[in-house]
Image (cartoon, grey):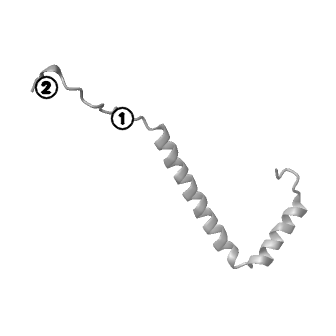
Amino acid sequence: MFENIGFGELFLIVLVIIVFFGPKKIPEFARSLGKGIVEFKRAMRDVQSELTKPEPPTQGPTNPTSSEKKE
């Protein structure tokens, strides 16, 4: 997808980001983006562990025995 982006294009993108956000907001933006990625990875690990966790054996409904039916 991004294999055709060269140095000139990357420089232009970074320049536009600096002009648009300003140099003071970029570290805050990067920090929040990093926290979001970490939280996303943590959630994905939790979902993956829930999907691979073995299911505990369930107790089916108990069938009354013949002695219980007579009572």
For residue 40, the mark is: none
How many C-alpha atoms fall within 10 Å of the one at disc 2: few (<14), some, or many (≥20)? few
Q: Looking at the picture, which amino acid does disc 1 mark? A: Pro
For residue 68, the mark is: 2
Name, please, the residue furthest toward the top. 66
The structure residue drawn at horizontal position 52% and vertical position 53%, both measured from the top left corner, is 42
Name, please, the residue furthest toward the left. 71
Whole-number angstrom distance, CA of label 1 to CA of label 2: 28 Å
Q: Secondary structure at mark 2?
A: helix
Identify the residue position indicated by label 1 in the image: 56
Q: Which of label 1 and label 2 is nearer to you? A: 2
Q: Looking at the picture, which amino acid does disc 2 mark? A: Glu
How many C-alpha atoms fall within 10 Å of the one at disc 1: few (<14), some, or many (≥20)? few
Q: Secondary structure at mark 1?
A: loop
Tell me residue 20's x, y (percent).
Answer: 78, 77
The structure residue drawn at horizontal position 62% and vertical position 68%, both measured from the top left corner, is 31
Vertical relation: 12 (above or below) 20: above
